[in-house]
Amino acid sequence: MPAPIITEGDCFISRFTLKPERRDEFLAMFTGLVDNFRDAMGETTHFVFYGWSRAGEYVAIESWKSPEIVAAVRADPAFVDLIGKLLDCCAKPMQMEVFNAMNSDGSVFTLNPVGKSTVHPDVGVGAAFI
């Protein structure tokens, strides 16, 4: 199967700096999230990648098919609860970088302005768009 070439949609790179003593707890919750939503994400995303950065951050890279899907995911009470628990495992705010595909309208930047996130739970260390 050839690799996809994405020219529409939005992409988010989330970087989680974990408290060392909470790493296993974070990974167990994140793995559960992925396992529970794997089929749905296959339908609603262009691609996903989960892994580690050179700096030791846990990285989630996700390209979603529409802003409406992102908004629906963020509004789901179970997702909000879980993200709050994940953020509580972090040593500093989760950093999220936003990208707009070359054939998209750029609204992702307006919906997710630089600074403290207003779309993620305000718990623990919180989240910020960079």
Image (cartoon, rainbow, N blue to C red):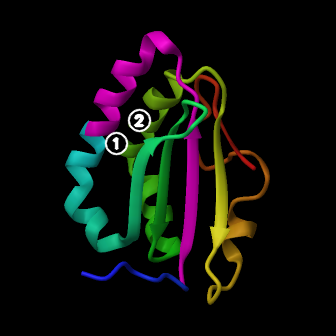
Q: Position of residue 92 (x, y in %)?
A: 66, 25
Residue at the location (67% across, 54% down)? 97
Which quadrant is the N terminus positioned in?
Answer: bottom left
Q: Position of residue 23 (x, y in %)?
A: 42, 20
Residue at the location (50% across, 63% down)? 71
Q: In the orientation shown, which residue stands out farthest toward the bottom?
A: 103
State which quadrant residue 111 falls in. bottom right
Q: In the orientation shown, which residue stands out farthest toward the top?
A: 21
13 falls in the magenta region:
yes
On screen, residue 67 versus residue 81, left or right, reads right
15 falls in the magenta region:
yes
Residue 63's place in the image compared with 36, above or below, is below
| Type of the residue with mark 1 | Ala
Q: Position of residue 46 (x, y in %)?
A: 40, 74
State which quadrant residue 51 falls in. top left
| Type of the residue with mark 2 | Asp
Which residues fall within the magenta stretch? 8-31
Residue 112's place in the image compared with 36, above or below, is below
On screen, residue 77 versus residue 70, left or right, reads left
Residue that numbered label 1 is attached to:
78
* C-beta proximity under 8 Å, tags 1 and 2: yes
Q: Secondary structure at mark 2?
A: helix
Residue at the location (61% across, 32% down)? 55
Q: Secondary structure at mark 1?
A: helix
Of the pair 88 and 5, the residue shown nearer to us: 5
Category of crowding for the residue at label 1, using alpha-carbon neighbours closer than 10 angstroms: few (below 14), some (14–19), many (at least 20): few
Q: Position of residue 66 (x, y in %)?
A: 48, 76
On screen, residue 1 versus residue 8, left or right, reads left
Residue 81 badge: 2
